[in-house]
């Protein structure tokens, strides 16, 4: 019984692992445009479009820089809440990362 209790306590004490989420840039849109993640997770933006794009948070919390076709960038989401983002080159391209 004591061993089971010890194992149960260790399971709760183990750190959570951050997940990686994918957003593809294609046809002048983010796919998916809305994504839910946990604080500490990363989002990988991959440009599958023929034009150069960015994924730039409106609040300045992340910016991929310019991504040419076939390039990707990872950003870490470090704060809870909604983080709207856009392409700094094409302002009609928008999305939101929501972190809990």
Image (cartoon, grey):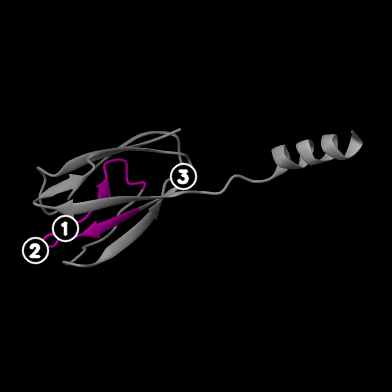
Label 3 close to label 1 by CB (< 8 Å): no
Give the residue at x 42% y 46%.
77
Residue annotated with mark 2: 50
Label 3 close to label 2 by CB (< 8 Å): no
Q: Nearer the viewer, residue 87 or 7?
A: 7
Cα–Cα span, label 3 and label 2: 30 Å
Cα–Cα span, label 2 and label 1: 9 Å
Residue annotated with mark 3: 78
Q: Is residue 78 left or right of residue 21?
A: right
Report if residue 75 lies within the magenta region: no
**Residues shaded magenta:** 44-61
Q: Is residue 5 above or below residue 74?
A: above
Residue annotated with mark 1: 53
Q: Earlier in the sequence, mark 3 or mark 2?
A: 2
Q: Secondary structure at mark 1?
A: loop
Q: Is residue 19 above or below residue 48?
A: above
């Amino acid at each position: 019984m004591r061993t089971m209790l010890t194992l149960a306590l260790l399971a709760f004490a183990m750190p959570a692992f951050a997940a990686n989420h994918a957003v593809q840039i294609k046809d002048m849109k983010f796919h998916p445009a809305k994504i839910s993640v946990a604080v500490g997770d990363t989002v990988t933006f991959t440009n599958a479009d023929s034009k150069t794009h960015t994924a730039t948070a409106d609040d300045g919390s992340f910016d991929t820089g310019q991504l040419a076709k076939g390039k990707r960038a990872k950003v870490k989401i470090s704060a809870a809440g909604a983080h709207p983002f856009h392409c700094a080159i094409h302002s009609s391209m928008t999305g939101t990362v929501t972190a809990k």
